[in-house]
Amino acid sequence: MSQWRDDQPIFLQIRQRMIEMILRGQIKEGDPLPSVRQIATDLSVNPLTVTKSYQSLVDMNIVEKRRGLGMFVTVGAQENLLAHEREKFLAEDWPAIKARIAALGLSYDELIKNRDADNE
């Protein structure tokens, strides 16, 4: 099985992995990102693909380039990403989830009951 999905460019999938690492605190504000070469080797992708994903993080003001030093997570990145990812979820993912819930005829009580069962 491939580690890459066919429905999205690889550079966006790498960007999403970095975003998730920042959101989970695996890479903290002020920390350097792994080098482009390291990520390219680890994921068996072209370094230009990694560079493109890192550049998209720079464009989002989540990462900053420090000449001669590499890429670093900006201060406030986690908070900004959380707001961005929540907005993206509500705009892109939630409508489909909501439609699926309605199509299945699930009630709010059933969803909460199931959630509570998972927490036991």
Image (tube, rainbow, N blue to C red):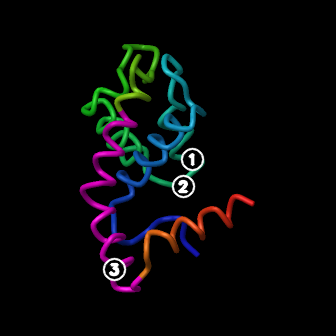
Q: Secondary structure at mark 2?
A: loop
Q: State which tag comes first along the sequence, 3 or 1.
A: 1
Is 1 positioned to the left or the right of 83 in the image? right
Which SS class for mark 3? helix
- Whole-percent x, y for residue 105 in the image: 39, 85
Q: Classify 10 Å Cα crowding around label 3: few (below 14), some (14-19), many (20 and above).
A: few
Label 3 with label 2: CB-CB less than 8 Å: no
**Residue topped by disc 2:** 44
CA distance separating discs 3 and 2: 41 Å
Q: Quadrant of residue 74?
A: top left
Segment colored magenta = 81-105
Q: Residues within 10 Å of mark 2 (few under 14, many from 20)?
A: few
* Membership of 93 in magenta stretch: yes
Find residue 49 and report its horizontal and vertical position in percent.
Answer: 37, 48
Q: Which residue is mark 1?
A: 41
Q: Nearer the viewer, residue 94 or 51?
A: 94
Residue at the bottom extreme, as displayed: 104
Q: Determine the residue positioned at 42% across, 48% down.
A: 16
Callout in the foreground (3, 2):
3
Q: Evaluate if marks 1 and 2 touch, with contact meaning CB atoms under 8 Å apart.
A: yes
As drawn, which residue projects farthest toward the right? 120
Q: Main secondary structure of the magenta part?
A: helix
Image x and y of residue 106, in percent: 44, 79
Instruction: State the mark number for residue 102.
Output: 3
Q: At label 2, which amino acid type do we have?
A: Ser
